[in-house]
Amino acid sequence: METVHTLADLQKYVSKIKAQNKTIGLVPTMGALHAGHLSLVQSAVNENDVCVVSIFVNPTQFNSPEDLKKYPRTLERDAALLEKAGCHLIFNPLTEDVYSKKDLKKTFEFDFGGLDTMMEGAFRPGHFNGVVQIVSKLFALIQPDRAYFGEKDFQQLAIIHRMVKLMNFEVQIVDCPIVREPGGLAMSSRNERLSPEERNIAANIFNILNENANFAPGKSPRALAESIACKINKVSGLRVEYVEIVEQKTLKIAENWENPAVVCVAVFCGKVRLIDNLKIDVQ
Ligand code: PAF
């Protein structure tokens, strides 16, 4: 496994792989890797000649400088995990190589077609502009045949699909299922900030989603969302930011159960903000 930090070294590597007609599978990450990331890497390794993992804590998608500063940076540990998982290349650039000063000053513009107006888009203004900005740069630089994203970030994934369509990238986006801890908590780099007690409390989020998904279609999506929010808020140590039931394809608020839906939540466990989701298909 190699690690490159500069755009020049990355370009050399990509040109060599392309000249050999080999396929590239890309897993974009911000590091602090966990089993969820490693499952994406496993798929990328299995389905492509070469697996590239980018590790870059992208400043333009953070809402607060404090959050950006606190984000765990664990390159050595990540590299050891990736080597074991069969990754071929880590791309770990410096911010100044990726962004000009001008890039960092103004918000990247993208036509989200309404996909960003609710949930993460509403509570983290500008977040998805930063995500599209970095992922489009990575796609242009690495020219992957396939790119792997986790379904835990359901709204991000919908936006990436739109971006690929609008920008005509020739990459297949592979949606990968959520990986959960044995108690049900969705794997996330943020889980490292939970105490062992908080981890147990946070497991209630998925358990409540799972138990209540069975109540569809007996309740309207709105009533079900309200009831889930109420149950999560009743758990001491959890505080709901949002519970929304949206259509899987359009992310529009589901008014009935005609189309496959997904319940998406953001919940504070102590000071740590967690997101999770569960698909509901009553057909
Ligand atoms: O999902 C993430 O970790 C990030 O949003 C991504 C896709 C790596 C872009 O920085």
Image (cartoon, rainbow, N blue to C red):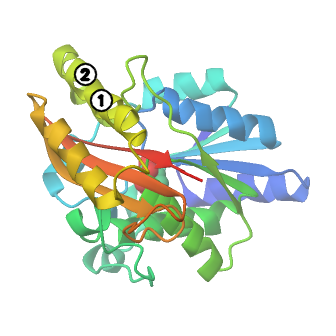
Name the residue that disc number 1 marks: 191
Q: Quadrant of residue 187?
A: top left
Mark 1–mark 2 CB contact (< 8 Å) = yes
Q: Is residue 132 above or below residue 234?
A: below
Q: Is residue 21 left or right of residue 218?
A: right
Q: Residue drawn at (25%, 21%), measured in percent from left and top?
A: 199
Q: Residue drawn at (34%, 28%), measured in percent from left and top?
A: 207
Question: Residue lying farthest right?
Answer: 20
100 or 33, which is in the foreground? 33
Residue 211 is labelled as: none
Where the N terminus falls, by quadrant? Answer: top right
Query: Within 8 Å: ligand 1 and the Cβ of disc 1?
Result: no
Name the residue that disc number 2 marks: 199
228 or 89, which is in the foreground? 228
Badge 2 marks a residue whose secondary structure is: helix
Q: Is residue 66 left or right of residue 37?
A: left
State the image coordinates of residue 215 (x, y, percent, origin top left): 38, 42
State the image coordinates of residue 115 (x, y, percent, origin top left): 42, 73
Badge 1 marks a residue whose secondary structure is: helix
Q: Residue drawn at (28%, 34%), measured in percent from left and top?
A: 205
**How busy is the neighbourhood of tag 2: few (under 14 within 10 Å), some, or many (20 plus)?**
some
- Give, as a three-letter code, the residue at label 1: Asn
- Give, as a three-letter code, the residue at label 2: Arg
Q: Quadrant of residue 97?
A: bottom left
State the image coordinates of residue 216 (x, y, percent, origin top left): 42, 48
First-in-chain label (1 vs 2): 1
